[in-house]
Image: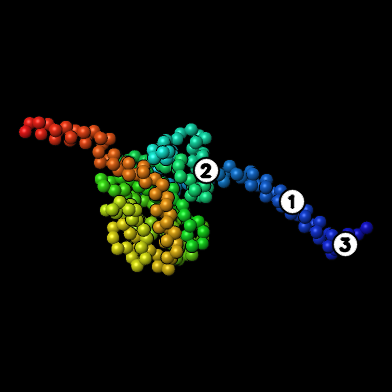
């Protein structure tokens, strides 16, 4: 009996069989490549963090101490399972945006200077925006030393410019807090007007607003840690303040 290849039954059966075969092949291929895909994602995360540190040519595993922010303190992680959890969190932007504790934080010390890289996540005009920001405590503030940003689908030539080196370089050297202690770093429409601001992207206002919200919200979760570190820088864990107080007391007694 000849098969009627023009019949609806034949077309439906043929389509189902092909879908099953192709689906099985794709599933097999995805499974076989999963380890390589995961390794590529992990490597991309490490490269981005090192770019934020300004050490793109250095080895992440050799110079970076991984940790979590727990109760306002830097808690190093080294166990393989914990490390995997940190990187998995970096890859889950929804989880990262909702988390308030156990946040990923990366530390690097070089030439006596300690820097921290924090993940940042937010929403642009058309979708997710994300990245990493490197921070360093100064005598009276916290300064951005580097930033890496990317996006899911911002407009080319406009909002998508946040992923360019030109825009990211403009953040370097900006201090986080103004004289009143308020978070002040932002992309300013019409051009930067003070030392905390960066020129906004012409025509990319909504994306710039998203960047501002992303920085304020993401970095804000680490504020207690950053400000505590700044206070420690100013007063060497209290030892210098105690020494100064003793000197003043001795001077009073002598008088």
Instruction: State the image coordinates of residue 80 (x, y, percent, origin top left).
Output: 50, 34
Mark 1 lies on a secondary structure that is helix
Residue 63 appears in view: no
Question: Whole-Å distance between the Cαs marked 1 and 2?
Answer: 32 Å
Residue drawn at x 43%, y 68% as measured from the top left? 203
In the picture provided, is 245 more to the left or to the right than 212? left
In the rendered image, which residue does mark 2 sit on? 88
Instruction: State the image coordinates of residue 237 (x, y, percent, origin top left).
Output: 27, 35
Question: Whole-Å distance between the Cαs marked 2 and 3?
Answer: 52 Å
Question: Residue 21 bears which disc, if any?
Answer: 1
Quadrant into which the C terminus falls = top left
In the picture provided, is 153 more to the left or to the right than 56? right
Proximity of marks 2 and 3: CB atoms separated by less than 8 Å: no
Sequence order check, earlier mark of 1 and 3: 3
Can you tell which quarter of the image residue 195 is in?
bottom left
Proximity of marks 1 and 2: CB atoms separated by less than 8 Å: no
Residue drawn at x 29%, y 39% as measured from the top left? 232
Sequence order check, earlier mark of 2 and 3: 3
Instruction: State the image coordinates of residue 193 (x, y, percent, origin top left).
Output: 29, 63
Q: Residues within 10 Å of mark 1 (few under 14, many from 20)?
A: few
Farthest residue, direction right: 1
Sequence order check, earlier mark of 1 and 2: 1
Q: Residues within 10 Å of mark 3 (few under 14, many from 20)?
A: few
Question: Residue 4 bears which disc, if any?
Answer: 3
Looking at this view, is 11 or 188 the one in front? 188
Quadrant into which the N terminus falls = bottom right
Mark 3 lies on a secondary structure that is loop
Looking at this view, is 183 or 42 the one in front? 183
Figure coloring:
rainbow
Question: Whole-Å distance between the Cαs marked 1 and 3?
Answer: 22 Å
């Amino acid at each position: 009996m000849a098969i009627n290849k023009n019949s609806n039954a034949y077309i439906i059966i043929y389509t189902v069989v092909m879908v099953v075969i192709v689906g099985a092949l794709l599933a097999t291929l995805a499974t076989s490549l999963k380890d390589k895909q995961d390794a590529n994602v992990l490597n991309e995360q490490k490269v981005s963090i090192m770019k934020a540190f300004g050490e793109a040519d250095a080895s992440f595993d050799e110079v970076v101490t991984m940790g979590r922010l727990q109760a306002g303190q830097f808690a190093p992680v080294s166990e393989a399972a914990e490390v995997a959890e940190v990187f998995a969190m970096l890859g889950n932007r929804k989880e990262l945006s909702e988390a308030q504790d156990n946040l990923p934080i990366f530390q690097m010390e070089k030439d006596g200077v300690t820097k921290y890289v924090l993940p940042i996540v937010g929403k642009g005009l058309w979708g997710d925006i994300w990245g990493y920001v490197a921070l360093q405590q100064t005598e009276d503030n916290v300064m951005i030393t580097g930033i890496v940003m990317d996006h899911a689908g911002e407009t080319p030539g406009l909002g998508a410019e946040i992923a360019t080196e030109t825009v990211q370089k403009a953040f370097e050297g900006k201090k986080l807090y103004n004289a009143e202690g308020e978070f002040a770093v932002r992309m300013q429409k019409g051009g930067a007007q003070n030392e905390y601001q960066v020129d906004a992207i012409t025509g990319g206002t909504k994306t710039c607003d998203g960047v501002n919200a992303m920085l304020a919200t993401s970095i804000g979760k680490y504020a207690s840690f950053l400000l505590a570190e700044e206070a420690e820088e100013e007063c060497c864990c209290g030892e210098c303040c105690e020494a100064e107080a003793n000197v003043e007391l001795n001077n009073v007694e002598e008088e």
